[in-house]
Image: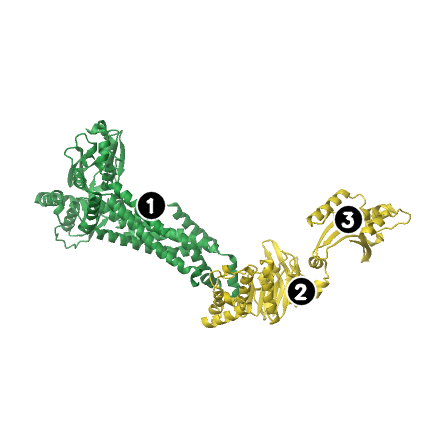
Chain colours: A yellow, B green
Amino acid sequence: MITVENLTKYFGNNLVLNNLNTVINKGEIISIIGPSGSGKSTFLRCLNLLEEPTSGKIIIDGVNILDKKNNPNRLRQKMGMVFQSFNLFDHLTVLGNLTIGPVKLLKMSETEAKAQGRDLLNMVGLAYKENSFPAELSGGQQQRVAIARCLSMHPEIILFDEPTSALDPTMVSEVLGVIRRLASDGMTMAIVTHEMNFAKDVSTRVLYMDEGRIYEEGTPSEIFDKPQKEKTREFIYRIRSFNYHINDKNFDLFDLKSGIERFCTKHFLDSRSTLRIQLVVEELLQLCFFEGDRDKRNHHIEDNGGLNICISYSEKNNELSVEFSAHKSLVTILNQVENTDGISINILKGIAYLSETITDDRITLRAVIS
Amino acid sequence: MKKLVLYFFILSISVSISSCFSDETDKGQKQLQETKLRTLDDIRTKNIGVLLGSLQDEYVTQNFPNANIIRIDHSSDLAMSLQQGQCEAILLDNVTSSYLMKENGSFAYLDDSVTQNTFAVGFQSDKKFLQNKFNEFLKEIRNNGIYEKIYDRWIINSDTSVMPEIDNKGENGIIHMGTTGESIPFSFVKNNVIVGFDIELLYRFAAYMNMKLDIKIFNFGGMLAALISNKIDLGANSIMVTEERAKQILFSDGYFTTTSGMLALKSNLYNPGESKTDNKSFLDKFKESFVNNIVLEKRYILILDGLKVTFIITILAALFGTILGGFICAMRMSRRRILRLMSKGYIAFFRGIPQVVFLMLMFYVVMAPFKTDGVTVAVISFAMYFSAYVSEMFRTSIESIKKGQTEASLAMGFSKFCTFIYIIFPQAVQRVLPVYKGEFISLVKITAIVGYIAVLDLTKASDIIRSRTFDAFFPLIMVAVLYFLLAWGLTLILDFLEIKTAPKRNL
């Protein structure tokens, strides 16, 4: 139904959409998720030309709508849009909002349009508000009217641009309820949303957008349960991370420690967790650089690109972990050496679950703090 | 709230009226004996009122160097300033003074013969031929006794005089004449027709030339400007020949000579002569003023005509100004830089120039070659002015509408034009009306300046009445009330519109 090819959009010098390609088929319900600023809304607004793409093609029913000779107004009639800020026409009543389009654009008679408008209001549960003005309605009610207004034009697809973001939590469900109902009626929809559970339930396909393109896509269970790519995972699990790079044993321990402290404060981690992270990092560094055959290990690390430290916190699972990674020639990061007192390793085992894996040419030690 | 405002308004007016009619002799008695005026020497350091740019002005400037000279446009305003004590004395020609004293018993001569002055007809500088003809004509009527008849009719028996029928086929074209209609007995309005010494003289001159006479009414300064800019061929309005004026205007031989006397309040004079005491009640005075200013000579017709002109100019200027303002606004919001710059320039131009100056520029300079009539020029000028102001109001109200409204409408499939008509415009109208109303009301009031370009509007009508009755208060207050009512009525209409366009109307 809609094919998007190499869609690119610049705002000034700022690249917002970068060579985006996708296909939307009839009957699909597509959720578009991703961090703010990743171009989700811009993508949606490009689809009905509220933003003019810089380059690329949008082909609807075989016609490239970016071709200047095609009239965008006809196209837009077939494509409804629901906005974050509702955008009901303030000077018209609820029923007026639902009749103006059909009467002026579809050349429907006033009585017909009113009858249709009342039916639609019934469907969204607001028949009793037909003579109210938008300013007299709550946000949730306004958004339901906005959806009804969209339907009054008999669109083939509805684009939802964060339909619940401007609502307070008590009103979100009434709007999502209406969208669910449309989904069960088989309406084709593209929904930009931050309601992950809703997206998981209702959609047939999920697009994760990042860096101005579709970073990962798949069925809801693919994206939400086993995201494949790192950024998708970070987004889905709401992971916050702190990265630090060490070249050799002469690293700045105090800079590292203060960095960890800032990261913990920023994400409101309690002092106990903060202390544990510090402890895990210190003991691991101790084992890695200063036990066993120190000079050889140090050369290995120095010659093969140093040591990466990554501290991450998953808001969703409430999981704190520390990862050390280096070139696999190091053999082990944990570096358990016989004949030592074993204090470090005992401390570590006491507060974290340790696992060492080798993938490709990297060796990674993961310490999950319990 | 509205009623309260109205009560307050009526109250303040009645207070001001009663203060105007309060007995002036009270003031006089409070004056100390030693400050009373005996001779011209007593006013050498006082305030002396004269007509602006007149011979008396020159005379006082030269001979009373220590006096504070107050220059005023109309003899009626001059009389008022004497009455109110803004001047201790006024220097005025004795013909006018005699009318003044007849209407107002509280004036008397301090000295009835201060200087001589001569009146002449002014000609546009290219009209040498007319000037010569007029001088010939003047000689002829002085010899054949017609001049004396004119003199008798307007100077001796002016109260009962009517214009005689003058036979004139008018086959040789038209003479355009300017006058003020505010200089009794030379040029004044009686029974709503312009008559007087100068008027008869010029009608006879036109007959002598076998040309039609077309009379336009200006204020004095406007008449001189019209003469210089060739809007009119000649001006006759007891014009005194001064050196300044002679530089730009051709003057005929003098057709009338009179002396000027220094007038003062009787109560200020050491030797006032017999005093006429006035014991009428406030109500009687009010009634008398009403009859004098409104009923006599059917002067209310003058007022009504003036009101009509004010109304027409306001409505037409607002109508065209609003349409033009829409275009200016569209240009101002255009995507093309050149259009934006042009509209910006247009708006800046009108913001920077006083309306009265622009109006006069339009009449005497820009549109002078087309001989357009004053009402048309006024409508065009005010419409342009109005458009500049309302276009910015339109723009801000359109810009104040959230972008989402446009987006929702576009997303629905409306074209840009339809979006404006169905979505933006109705909302913008609601928002602009409150400020638009204010601008409209100030348009009603600013039309009071059209007297400068020979349009007989409400203000000018009151000027003409004042020049006849020498009663400043009543006509001014009446005109103030009429403007208030006009503005109020028009506001009500706009209020109605505002209610009509408000979105709550369906509830």
Q: Picture coordinates of residue A301 (x, y %)?
A: 82, 49
Alpha carbons under labels 2 and 3: distance apart? 35 Å
Which numbered disc flags the more N-terminal residue, 2 or 3?
2
Q: Nearer the viewer, residue B376 or B25?
A: B25
Q: Is residue B92 at all visible to an observer of this figure?
A: yes
From the top left corner, tell me how far across and down residue A295 is, in percent: 86, 45
Q: What is the crowding at mark 2: few (fewer than 14 residues within 10 Å), some, or many (at least 20)? A: some
A58 or B152: which is nearer to us? B152
Q: Secondary structure at mark 1?
A: helix
Spatial CA span between label 1 and label 3? 83 Å
Q: Nearer the viewer, mark 1 or mark 3?
A: 3
Quarter of the image for residue A353 reads: bottom right
Indicate which label's residue lies in the foreground, 2 or 1.
2
User: The residue tagged with tag 3: helix, strand or loop?
Assistant: helix
Under mark 2, the amino acid is: Lys
Left or right placement of residue B44 versus residue B168 in this view: right
The chain containing the residue under callout 2 comes to A
Taking the view exactly as shown, the residue that stands out farthest to the right is A339
Looking at the image, which residue sits at the far top? B34
**Disc 1 target residue:** B357
Q: Same subunit under labels 2 and 3?
A: yes
